Amino acid sequence: MRTIHKFPFEIKDEIHLQMPHGARAIAVQEQFGVLCFWVAVDTEAELVDHVFKARATRQRLDGTEGRHIGTVQQVRGHIVIHLFEEWLSTGYQVPTSGADGPALEVKEE
């Protein structure tokens, strides 16, 4: 069954979370002082490691960040973090054009 689940996390350069294969983050926000991803998942899929990357404003991007999920502000806007989902974690093909590229398709395995 496809549904949306919440995954709390702590800020690190690389964030590893166990999620169903093919899961795709759709939002990131702070809720009650805790940072959370909201993710579309297939509850019947096998759990795999999903990797997210956090980058601060003006921090160098190395091209491995993946798809931008969103930006969160903490401490009254003094800390601004941009969160990305690694393409390989999603089970989706890496786009070849545009910010998010063409419509994404699930990889056949």
Image: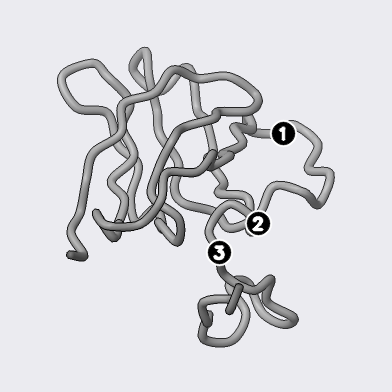
Q: Amino acid at mark 1?
A: Arg
Q: Residue at x 46, y 51 (%)?
A: 69
Number of other residues with Cα within 10 Å of mark 3, as a class: few under 14, some 14 to 19, many 20 or more:
some
Residue underneath mark 3: 91
Between 40 and 36, the residue placed more toward the observer is 40
Relative placement, left or right, of 35 versus 68 is: left
Q: Nearer the viewer, mark 2 or mark 1?
A: 2
Query: How far apart are the two marked residues, 3 and 1, measured between alpha carbons?
Result: 29 Å
Relative placement, left or right, of 29 versus 5 is: right
Secondary structure found at label 2: helix
Q: Amino acid at mark 3?
A: Gly
Instruction: Give the vertical position of 80 relative to 1 (above or below).
Output: above
Relative placement, left or right, of 20 versus 93 is: left
Number of other residues with Cα within 10 Å of mark 1, as a class: few under 14, some 14 to 19, many 20 or more:
few
Residue underneath mark 2: 88
Secondary structure found at label 3: loop
Secondary structure found at label 1: loop
Q: Nearer the viewer, mark 3 or mark 1?
A: 3
Which tag, 3 or 1, sits closer to the chain's start?
1
In the picture, the quarter occupied by the C terminus is bottom right
Number of other residues with Cα within 10 Å of mark 2, as a class: few under 14, some 14 to 19, many 20 or more:
few
